Image (cartoon, helix red, strand yellow):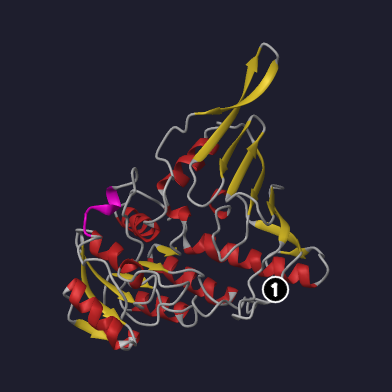
Amino acid sequence: MSYRGAIIGLGWMGMLYDLAQRMGHWHVDDVDRPTPELDVHRRFPYHERHNPRSNVPTSYAEALADRPEIKLVAAAERDPKRLAAFQQRYAVDALYTDARQMLETERPEIVAIASNTKGRAALTCLAVECGAKGIVTEKPIADTIEEAERMVSICAAAGVPLVCGATSVNHPSFAVARGLLAEGAIGELVSMESVVFAQHQNWAYFLTDAPAWVIGHGDEDPRESGSGEFRGDGLMVTGGGLGVHFRKGAPAVRLTGTTGEILHAGNYTPWQIFKDVETSTGVTRIEWPWPGVQLNQAGGAAIDGLNDVMDCLAGRLDEPKNSGRRVAMALEVEVALKMSAAQGGCRVELPLKDRSAGLDYDWHR
């Protein structure tokens, strides 16, 4: 089956990541900078490449262009220079400076929303109203819990798979880890450890029960850039009694079981699995070979997220790994952790009563 694809926002994650050399952190205001040759990222098919993952692009534009079943037909962006660069690279003439007009006119079926956080919820809902069958957005999901819930509920009602963020959770190795956990490779799960950073929600994918309450402490003051994201330590406990510990410097995710551990240290380092075995001196925990696709290099997270959308549409997957539902849940946990820290580390019950609560994000999000 073929789909018409479109992208909203041609900034760093939308397009420039794979066109512009990084000239300093977040300095992506225009496209007048040295760029690689135009064909440097055209070694298709990327969506089938997991190991090795060298030279895998990162932008949503490349993710859409990579899929043979998607025809990239339109883009919306306020900067005319970026629109011109997009037209040159992808030979697409349906260019808009107004995202609403593009959605209502072109009615694309696969939509990537890489605009700033403000307005992302409204654009996601409008895309569904205009006939979108699959949506990927950049992180964070939205500014408020209420907005995130609206995105998730509207997509769910229409049967539209929603992925929120190009993060490592999209990588198929996370599914390997979850499968190992489900089959009892490390016994019964007794705790998780992770970090809270810019909605890289490595832990949310492994939950089977809803969060019940949190305690947060050590939150940092808002940064000059405007970010008020939670940047401290904390504890979350699910309705089933599972504890998830958040601390600065923690691994991306550590799954501790009664007979072993599964560990992803972060920064695209390989997964590790440790199992308890009987030895002549007693029970010893040793590392075992990783039994599947491995996470060993950065890049391709947008492609992996789109893979999940396409697998859902093909009936091969029930829910994306980094689904809007999971990310919305994680947003609420972050908000609650921040509330707890501001109140001296008191226990905050979930779900929160104030659904308008949210977080302030850096301008580049």
The part of the chain drawn in magenta is: 42-48
Q: Judge the density around disc 1: few (<14), some (14-19), many (≥20) Cα neighbours within 10 Å.
A: few
Horizontal side, residue 338 vs residue 108: left or right: right
- In the foreground, 98 or 44: 44
Q: Is residue 336 left or right of residue 5?
A: right
Q: Which residue is label 1 attached to?
A: 353
Image spot of residue 190 (x, y percent): 68, 40
Q: Quadrant of residue 24?
A: bottom left
* Image spot of residue 345 (x, y percent): 81, 65
Does 26 appear in magenta? no
Q: Percent x, y for residue 9?
A: 36, 78
Name the quadrant of the N terminus: bottom left
Looking at this view, name the residue that lies furthest to the top. 280
The quadrant holding residue 219 is bottom right
- Can you say whether 80 is above or below 350 in the image? below
Q: Residue at x 47, y 77 (%)?
A: 121
Residue drawn at the location 63% of the way across and 81% of the way down: 224
Q: Viewer-proximal residue, 31 or 208?
A: 31
